[in-house]
Amino acid sequence: MRILVLHGPNLNLLGIREPQLYGTASLDEINKRIMQWANREGIEADIRQSNLEGELVTWIQEAIGRYQGIVINPAAYTHTSIALRDAIVSAGIPTVEVHLSNIYRREPFRHQSFIAGVAVGQVSGFGSDSYLLGLQAIVEHLRKGRPSKS
Ligand code: DQA
């Protein structure tokens, strides 16, 4: 099973960026944990980060036929990007949305996600564990063969 893990804008600054909100782990450290989890589970995971909306859209399109699932932290694009939402729908690849912080405990503009309505589900608020929980969720979902829109 191949899973694509996508990190959106500013997540390359994890560790130094607002550590009170996002924790002190760097993106490299989080990625190492993701790879360790994937290896233990026998999952192939590819991880990418971009600050560019269009690049994320392209990667989602290119995932068609190559990945069975996507775990994405769209970061600020969560709250703005219809393009990312459309890409997820167009690709038809079951996707789990993850956030380090609990977006519903923060500013009102973060309460809206353009992604949640087309995702299998969302994990929000567990720090870097959100990625591992999201991975677990997508893998279980795919193993059970649930339809992506249920
Ligand atoms: C975030 C939450 C977003 O609102 C914010 O723009 C981010 C990070 C999170 O992981 O908690 O960049 O996606």
Image (cartoon, rainbow, N blue to C red):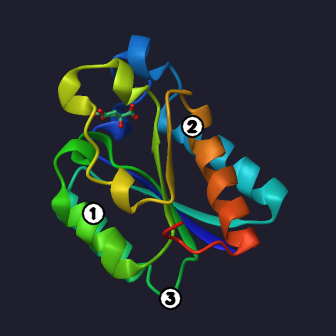
- Which mark is first along the chain, 2 or 1? 1
**Residue 8, how many percent across, how many down?**
32, 48
Which residue is nearer to you in this view: 62 or 29?
62
Q: Residue at x 22, y 43 (%)?
A: 79
- Which mark is first along the chain, 3 or 1? 3
**Residue 30, how many percent across, how many down?**
57, 38
Which residue is nearer to you in this view: 146 or 30?
146
The residue at which mark 3 appears reads as: 65
Disc 3 marks a residue whose amino acid type is Gly
The label nearer to you, 1 versus 3, is 1
Query: SS at mark 2?
Result: helix
Does residue 87 appear in this view? yes
Looking at the rendering, in which quadrant would you find the N terminus? bottom right
The residue at which mark 1 appears reads as: 85
Depicted 39 relative to depicted 93: above or below: above
Could you tell whether 1 is left or right of 73 in the image?
A: right
Disc 1 marks a residue whose amino acid type is Arg
Q: Quadrant of residue 46?
A: bottom right
Is the residue at mark 2 in contact range of ligand 1, meaning its CB lies under 8 Å from it? yes
Could you tell whether 147 is left or right of 41 in the image?
A: left
The residue at which mark 2 appears reads as: 130
Labels 3 & 2 near each other (Cβ < 8 A): no
Labels 1 & 3 near each other (Cβ < 8 A): no
Query: SS at mark 1?
Result: helix
Q: Residue at x 65, y 53 (%)?
A: 137
Does residue 32 appear in this view? no
